[in-house]
Image: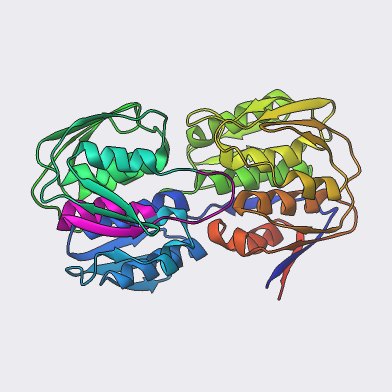
Amino acid sequence: MDKMVVQGGAQLNGLVKTSGAKNAALPILFATLLAEGEHVFRNVPRLRDIDSTVELLASLGCQSKWDLDTLRVRVKKAGSLEAHYDLVRKMRASILCLGPLLAKYGEAVVSMPGGCAIGTRPIDLHLDGMRALGAEIQLDEGYVKAKAPKLRGATFVFETCTVGGTENLMMAAALAEGTTILENAAKEPEIVDLANYLIAMGARIKGHGTGVITIEGVQTLRPAEYSIMSDRIEAGTLLIAGAMTGGEVTVQRIKPAHIDALVHKMREAGFRIDEDSDSVTVHPTKSWKAVDVTTNPYPLFPTDLQAQYMAMMSLAEGTSVITETVFENRFMHVQELIRLGADITPKTRVAIVRGHRGLKGAPVMATDLRASASLVLAGLVAEGETIVGRIYHLDRGYENLEKKLSALGAKVRRQE
């Protein structure tokens, strides 16, 4: 099992480009199930979760071929309508094949999903939405079994905002009969990216990026070519890395508006940050003050940057309060940061971070995708050597992170 070895103390400087967004690519890849033929995607990141998706698509009869960062997916009539447990358990996003299969073929059998252990993340709203469109749903031996000779448009109000639920319902409604209105829909940029690809396929969608999305169902969709948006979470992680090490780092190929909540908090803490049309630069800062943050759905502060932000606040002047409202079990990185010398008191959904200088390298263990990134960031500024274990979590969502950090001057390497 690979480990990441980080030698602390190096200042990061230079330019770095973000890769394609995993959280945009996954639902878009599952959307290919809605139309037979060859779909072509550019700017696709080479990640463990992408590989898992390609493997799952293959089990449903699709063929995929890579050419650098371009992925071609040839979709044939599905030979199987079952997403098996052995594939789905690896990644929670696998549930996103439910909507396309149900809309295209009238039935689907999908295992209950797995993924990072950061909370329960129930799929109830996915299933309630499918029922609203006319599907019959049964839960049997760990599988979701869904049938609907023809989905029909309906108005569905999400009880709580859900990115995956919004994506699943959008894809299902694209081939439903009539008009579907999704209220309290997620507003994330990844939702907009999926909607834009569906529109390129011939779907009729309005309101994506707002809380109310309207989908007018069509009879058929067609394959298209599309470029995946850049990863805003990777961009935020790299920006924090530059800030923590006191360097000047420009993160390229990112829409500044996508990380506006993070940039606002960093400026409040005392960092000088410049924005261009497709890049963000953080300038050297010797010290910064503690600033509270509360995670919330987009456009507010993202839960996927909470762990990295906490690592930065562990070096701040003063005390910050970090409140996690999205997932109930997303402070597992706290105990590992404490092993590096951070002064953090975790409560159920609140962490009190007393900033100070003086982290020291130690062996630590990654518990989930974003936690692993926070430990690498802390290792960049810790005295001595930090060894981060179980970095297969990191490989699920960051493409060549150690190479990008090394190119900026970090002393970091992968150890088998």
Q: Residue at x 89, y 39 (%)?
A: 357
Which residue is depicted at the point 37% across and 53% down? 95
Please report the bounds of the magenta region as a residue range.
Answer: 95-120
Relative side of 160 to 171, left or right = right
* Whether residue 187 is situated above or below residue 358 in the rendered picture: above
- Can you say which quadrant of the picture contains the C terminus? bottom right
**Residue 276 shows in the view:** no
Front position in the image: 401 or 87: 87
The verdict on residue 128 being magenta is no
Count of all numbered marks drawn on residues in the image? 0
Query: Could you say where residue 379 lies in the image, as x and y percent from the top left?
Result: 79, 53
State which quadrant residue 363 falls in. bottom right
Percent position of residue 381, x then y: 82, 49
| 112 falls in the magenta region | yes
In the rendered image, is residue 391 in sight?
A: yes
Left or right: where 293 falls relative to 382: left
